[in-house]
Amino acid sequence: MALVRKGSRHITVDGTDYRWRVRHKPTYTQGICATPMTFAVELAEEPGQTLVITTQHPHPETWLSVDSPAAVTPAVVAATIRNALAHGWSPESSGPAHHMQL
């Protein structure tokens, strides 16, 4: 499953270019705060296995009033990519998405 290019952001981690994206609209379960926000990462050129990261925070566009949600920053994305690579994520290989919890 490849990321949609529109709305994705580029990041370079240790000399490798990636794209990452947070959904603009929450899923129904994210909207009612039943599940937390997720974001996805893949190689910028010739994407392979997608990394899907589940955070501990609500989506910023949740329909319920909650305390201010945490932002996904490039520093968080870079640290998560390094952690995922250390724990077996292989972004150049094909296959199902690799899931991680933040």
Image: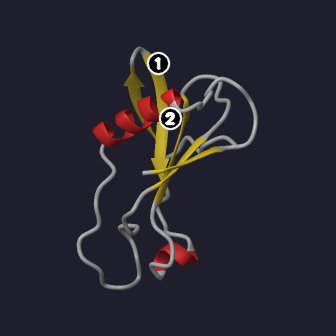
Give the percent coordinates (x, y) of residue 67: 24, 76
- Dot 2 surroundings within 10 Å: few (below 14), some, or many (20 or more)? some
Question: Which of label 1 and label 2 is nearer to you?
Answer: 2
What amino acid type should be assigned to the residue bearing mark 1?
A: Thr
Identify the disc placed on residue 84: 2
Element carrying mark 1: strand
Q: Residue furthest front?
A: 87
The answer to whether residue 68 is left or right of residue 96 is left
**Residue 50, relative to residue 47: is it above or below?**
below
Q: Residue furthest top?
A: 15
**Residue 30, relative to residue 37: is it above or below?**
below
The answer to whether residue 102 is left or right of residue 5 is left
Give the percent coordinates (x, y) of residue 74: 32, 39
Give the total of numbered labels.
2
Residue found at x 41% / y 14%: 15
What amino acid type should be assigned to the residue bearing mark 2?
A: Ala
**Residue 6, relative to residue 15: is it above or below?**
below
Reading the image, the residue beneath label 1 is 16
Identify the disc placed on residue 8: none
Front residue (pair 88, 77) = 88
Residue found at x 62% / y 27%: 90
Give the percent coordinates (x, y) of residue 87: 53, 33
Residue found at x 73% / y 42%: 96
The answer to whether residue 64 is left or right of residue 17 is left
Residue found at x 55% / y 40%: 5
Q: CA distance from mark 1 to mark 2?
A: 14 Å
